[in-house]
Image (cartoon, rainbow, N blue to C red):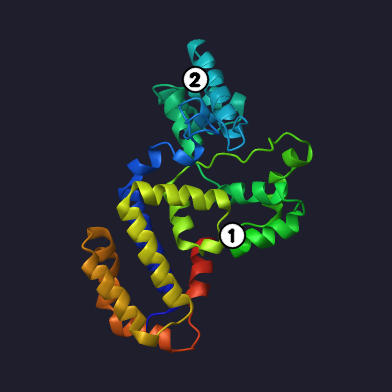
Amino acid sequence: MADAWHLLHNLAEAVERIVGRHCADLREPLTVWGTQHDGHAFEDAAQAELDIHGRPRPLVARTREHHQQIHERIERGGSLRAIARELRLSRGTVLRFARAAGVEELLAGAVHRLSKIDDYRLYLHHRWMEGCTNAAALTREIQLLGYRGNVNTVRRHLPPYRTGAIPTDAPLPQLTVRRVTNWIMRKPEQLTDTERKCLDDLRERSSTLATTTQYARRLTEIVRERRIEHLALDVWLADVRLDGQREPRSLASGVRRDHAAVLAALTTTTSTSGAVEGNVTRSC
């Protein structure tokens, strides 16, 4: 027998693969930002070194500093072991910096590294501007949206708001495969206005993303609400088959293969270990 958690988990993975195959659409400027941000919706090389609020990323600054320090000492004839000891870095780190063709190669990892709170920065910004400034309350809200971190991470994110260092206009979201997948999988009413507009723009741009969003949300509703009336699952499978697009049809193939198990999951109230397994996986 399948269970609801695994069904939604597999659905999210399938959606992520589809979004990943259309990542070129994520690099195009969003029309929703055309007037507010002069059409520059995505980061160029310099902007990529800033966080979502336009501040220098600490990891980027440390990477540049270490690269300069290490290469200055190499030019003076210092050994890697001595440099590592002097800068209190591991020898492997010093070796990696020494072998890099340039600092840009090292910055690639620093620029694209994501944290647990990245997908919720835009939501936190809007809620702060709406007057919700309590870290514990904000943490509870984003936990309902899927946030797996704790209140301390949220608290560390908020001081710039309290000191007025954060601009009042909403920060521009950086479109990533993970973020767009998250928008598709969440309930529409859980999205902020900005997230909804961005997703709508992507759906207008790509018929495949539009179809994927439609079918993913229908299946999610069937699973979460255990809807078995009017053969809801079979109607969903039939609609996907008739649609003719490759990605949604491949999305449904796994459900069709395990049809009996999926129906069992929708008709039973027996608890499963899905949520427990998810928590174990996240902690590994």
Comparing 222 with 3, the one in front is: 222
Q: Secondary structure at mark 1?
A: loop
Residue 96 in sight from this viewpoint: no
Q: Residue 223 in the image: x percent, y percent?
A: 43, 76
Question: For this view, does 223 lie left or right of residue 195?
Answer: left
Position above or below: 12 against 126: below
Question: For this view, does 160 lie left or right of residue 3?
Answer: right
Q: Which residue is mark 1?
A: 148
Marker count (numbered): 2
Q: Nearer the viewer, mark 1 or mark 2?
A: 1
Comparing 235 with 185, the one in front is: 235
Comparing 116 with 139, the one in front is: 139
Tell me if mark 1 has few (under 14), some (14-19) or many (20+) residues whose alpha carbon lies within 10 angstroms of its own. Answer: some
- Name the residue type under label 1: Arg
Comparing 1 with 172, the one in front is: 172
Q: Residue 86 in the image: x percent, y percent?
A: 61, 24
Which numbered dot is residue 200? none
Residue positioned 48% across, 56% down in the render: 183
Tell me if mark 2 has few (under 14), some (14-19) or many (20+) residues whose alpha carbon lies within 10 angstroms of its own. Answer: few
Residue positioned 59% across, 29% down in the render: 62
Q: Residue 188 in the image: x percent, y percent?
A: 51, 62
Q: Point out the tag, 1 or 2, that comes first from the N-terminus.
A: 2
Separation of marks 1 and 2 at Cα, in angstroms: 43 Å
Quadrant (top left/top right/bottom left/bottom right) for the N terminus: bottom left
- Name the residue type under label 2: Ser
Residue 274 in sight from this viewpoint: yes
Q: Which residue is mark 2?
A: 79
Position above or below: 197 against 111: below
